């Protein structure tokens, strides 16, 4: 073992720019260790600067996903909470609460596509079924070119090839990876998403493909299965407003150029459940609530039993409801 002292080149060569390197020879491999630079410690942290060092996070938390997690927990651990919630949103309790299923960040459509690839079917048959499903959903099952083109040509209609995103020549790729920009630029197959003065049909097909793609990306916050093919879908907000599609600046430009309106989160979620063959009752939970299926967090937490929950959880709910 030996040690070397190396100095960096430059006008200022002092102890701060000197590094100590230990070279260990073992099996003709060289390992170099380097001491990390020392960082000057701050006099105060941000909580001290703002005089909030004595305030716990649960008193200032504004994250709506955390409120969803609290609701999810309370519905799971207490069957009576689930029954009270069902009575609030649909006017009746379930006769079999033990059969209810509750999920957060519900991505059933995305995961169904993935699971189909694990079923053991030959790749050719997988591609055939996937292609047929896509064309049927888009109303393009009569399009001869899309029915008969190669896998790579099919993917190229919907996916923009980049350094990070490649086109597969072996399998039909998930609609979650589709690019709205590509819809606008594709020229194959008579430019099916055409735009211009005589573009109404092209615009509708463009919009249908965009909504189909978003169905594979959208994820309701909480979904409760009350039976095999019936659910309650919950979209929750605290201080934010309902999201809209498209979300990226580039995609918005494409919509504006075609004079197309944006689509709401809940509208895309409804279409997603239709693709799954599931009947959904949609509930929107916000700070203030509203009429119909719009509830406030106070409406929701006010009917739930929380006495057995951890102290911080109860205090966080109280803090959120007081804002």
Image (tube, helix red, strand yellow):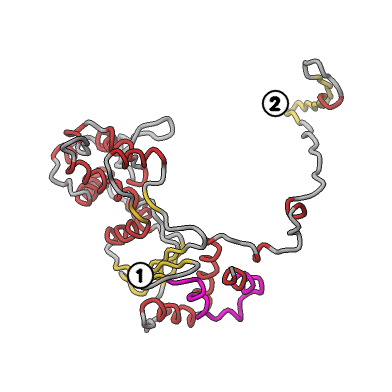
Residue at 29% of width from left, 68% of height from top? 279
The crowd level at tag 1 (other Cα within 10 Å; few <14, some 14-19, many 20+) is many
The residue range painted magenta reads: 295-317
Let me know if residue 301 is in the magenta part. yes
Residue 112: name its quadrant. Answer: bottom left
Q: Is residue 296 magenta?
A: yes
Q: Residue at x 55, y 81 (%)?
A: 305
Q: Is residue 258 above or below residue 99?
A: above
> Element type at marker 1?
strand
Q: Percent from the top left, x then y, of residue 137?
A: 22, 51
Relative horizontal placement of residue 315, taking residue 166 as reference (left or right): right
Q: Nearer the viewer, residue 55 or 183?
A: 55
Q: Residues within 10 Å of mark 2 (few under 14, many from 20)?
A: few
Q: Nearer the viewer, residue 285 or 188?
A: 285
Taking the image as shown, residue 151 lies to the left or right of residue 29, namely: left
Could you tell me residue 299's position as x and y percent? 48, 76
Which residue is at a point 45% across and 59% down the rendered structure image? 105
Return the x and y of residue 111 as percentages of the image width and height: 38, 55
Q: Which residue is mark 2?
A: 29
Q: Residue at x 76, y 26 (%)?
A: 25
Task: Give the Cα distance between marks 2 and 1.
Answer: 60 Å
The residue where tag 1 is placed is 231
Q: Which mark is residue 263?
A: none
Please say if the residues under marks 2 and 1 sit with CB atoms less than 8 Å apart.
no
């Amino acid at each position: 073992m030996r040690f070397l002292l190396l100095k960096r080149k430059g006008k200022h060569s002092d102890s701060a720019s000197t590094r100590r390197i230990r070279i260990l020879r073992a099996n003709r491999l060289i390992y170099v260790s380097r001491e990390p630079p020392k960082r000057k410690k701050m006099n105060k942290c941000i909580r001290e600067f703002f005089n909030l060092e004595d305030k716990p996070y649960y008193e200032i938390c504004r994250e709506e996903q955390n409120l969803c997690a609290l609701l999810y927990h309370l519905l799971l651990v207490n069957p009576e909470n689930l029954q009270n919630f069902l009575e609030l949103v649909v006017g009746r309790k379930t006769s079999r609460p033990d059969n209810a299923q509750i999920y957060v960040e519900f991505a059933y459509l995305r995961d169904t596509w993935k699971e189909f690839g694990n079923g053991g079917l030959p790749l050719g048959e997988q591609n055939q079924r996937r292609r047929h499903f896509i064309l049927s959903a888009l109303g393009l099952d009569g399009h001869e070119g899309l029915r008969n083109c190669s896998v790579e040509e099919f993917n190229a209609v919907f996916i923009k090839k980049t350094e990070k995103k490649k086109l597969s020549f072996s399998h039909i790729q998930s609609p979650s990876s589709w690019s709205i920009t590509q819809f606008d630029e594709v020229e194959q197959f008579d430019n099916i998403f055409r735009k211009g003065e005589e573009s109404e049909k092209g615009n509708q097909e463009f919009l249908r493909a965009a909504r189909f793609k978003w169905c594979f990306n959208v994820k309701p916050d909480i979904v409760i299965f009350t039976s095999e093919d019936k659910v309650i879908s919950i979209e929750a907000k605290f201080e934010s407003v309902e999201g809209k599609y498209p979300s990226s600046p580039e995609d918005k430009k494409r919509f504006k150029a075609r004079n197309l309106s944006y689509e709401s989160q809940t509208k895309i979620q409804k279409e997603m459940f239709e693709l799954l063959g599931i009947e959904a009752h949609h509930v929107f939970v916000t700070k203030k609530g509203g009429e119909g299926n719009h509830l406030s967090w106070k409406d929701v937490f006010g009917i739930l039993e929380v006495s057995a929950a951890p102290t911080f959880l109860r205090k966080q709910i109280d803090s959120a409801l007081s804002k």
